Amino acid sequence: MLDHVQRFGHQGLSVLTGFGRAGIVLWQSMWGAPDWRAGPGLLIRQLYFIGVYSLVIIVVSGVLIGMVLALQGYTVLVRFGAESALGQFVSLTLLRELGPVVAALLFVGRAGSAVTAEIGLMKATDQLAAMEMIGVDPLKRVVRPRLWAGIISMPILAQIFNMVAILGAVVVGVNWLGVDAGSFWANMQNTVEFREDVLNGSIKAFSFGVVVTWIAIFQGYDAIPTSEGISAATTRTVVHSSLAVLAMDFLLTAVMFGVD
Amino acid sequence: MYSRSMEILVGAFMLLGIAALAFLAIQVSGLSLNPSNRDTYQISATFTNVAGLTTRAKVSIAGVTVGQVTAIHLDPMSVRAVVDMSIQKQVDYLTTDSIAAIKTAGVLGDQYVSISVGGAPEMLQNGDVITDTQSALVLEDLVGKIITTLGTNN
């Protein structure tokens, strides 16, 4: 019995220290004077690997999800003769929920896991220790560009996802299923509010970007420097980030669109 | 460390993001940059019942949208519902004897405020109150009335 209590307490303490270390890593890598000698090159390089490389999966998934939404929405709405409401159905679903969440989940799989594996491998091959030896702070040099690249890329990717998904829905809804283009767009514009829907969706995407990148860099930085350790850290990144995104989505939805 | 093509692609990525936001703002949410629609003045109207009317509901004259409901609250003195509305500035021909009515678009559609302009010489100014109003038609009350009438007839 006492053993159980002891183990429980031990686990609780290790969770707390984990959060503490994660917070310190985030704080130290986020702030501080930028490294002028390296210039903006480090950040641009990471934006390229994290943002531009994620573009293909984001665009393809966005188009497909928009098309599926239009198809499913149409089959339900046409039963009530309300197929002209397809535009608002698709756009509200995407802007408020699906866009930020699915883009974040794709971002975890595409970029978050890569960041963890990269930083973890740098640690395992003692590259981070070598940097410290020659007086370069690895948190600044390695972690900070990746963190900022993730925070900047995520809202951009989410908005691109929303745009191509709505265009995909237009192709299926208007061009194939024959919903009137005028009522499709007019209904959409009447119901979608810029502040309420577009900006709140962007805030969601931004918060997901911070959390997902934070988890990714911390898991890489904190990985046990062995091959098993890196694989476990990469798995943890995907699992923790996905759960964090879904849990935060519920909280943010409750705050933003919940009870008036 | 990085090449020029990488810079160009990152720049294109950023621009694509801004373009997406602009698309969502203008084409999807219909955000208007035209300032004339944003210049508004406030009027309010008191109703005995606003059942189903919500904030951001449309305010229309002859079916043309001229503003929206900004707030609904209860006046503690008269125990009537006060509906605050913002009306576009260019619509400056609402007379003081205008009638505000809460109507429903379609059988089960959204409720909106319809204003009928009267013939008085004075116009409503910012902050004025319309007291001549028709309240929302509550379907349950109507059904209840029909049932009681049928009951007394038998």
Image (cartoon, coloured by chain):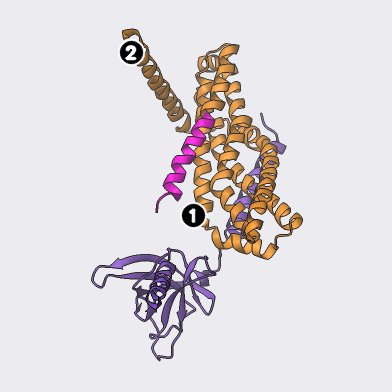
Chain colours: A orange, B purple
> Quadrant location of the N terminus of chain A?
top left
| Helix, strand or loop for the magenta stretch, by majority | helix
Residue B103 pos. (x, y %): 47, 73
Q: Which residue is mark 1?
A: A196
**Which residue of the protein is positioned furthest toward the front in this rendering?**
B154
Regarding mark 2 in the picture, which secondary structure is present there? Answer: helix
Q: Which residues are magenta?
A: A241-260
Chain ID at mark 2 = A
**Which residue of the protein is positioned furthest toward the right in this rendering?**
A176
* The label number, if any, that marks residue A5 in the structure image: 2
How dense is the environment of label 2, judged by Cα within 10 Å: few (below 14), some, or many (20 and up)? Answer: few
**A11 left or right of A107 in image:** left
The residue under label 1 is which amino acid type? Glu
Quadrant in which residue A37 is drawn: top right
Residue B52 pos. (x, y %): 42, 64
* The label number, if any, that marks residue A260 in the structure image: none
> Quadrant location of the C terminus of chain A?
bottom left
Q: Nearer the viewer, residue B81 or A106?
A: B81
What residue sits 47% from the left and 70% below the top?
A: B112
What residue sits 44% from the left and 83% below the top?
A: B94
The residue under label 2 is which amino acid type? Val
* Residue A35 visible in the snapshot: no
Residue A237 pos. (x, y %): 54, 25
Q: Is residue A94 magenta?
A: no
**A2 left or right of A42 in image:** left
CA distance for labels 2 and 1 = 47 Å
Residue A12 pos. (x, y %): 37, 19
Chain ID at mark 1 = A
* Residue B25 visible in the snapshot: yes
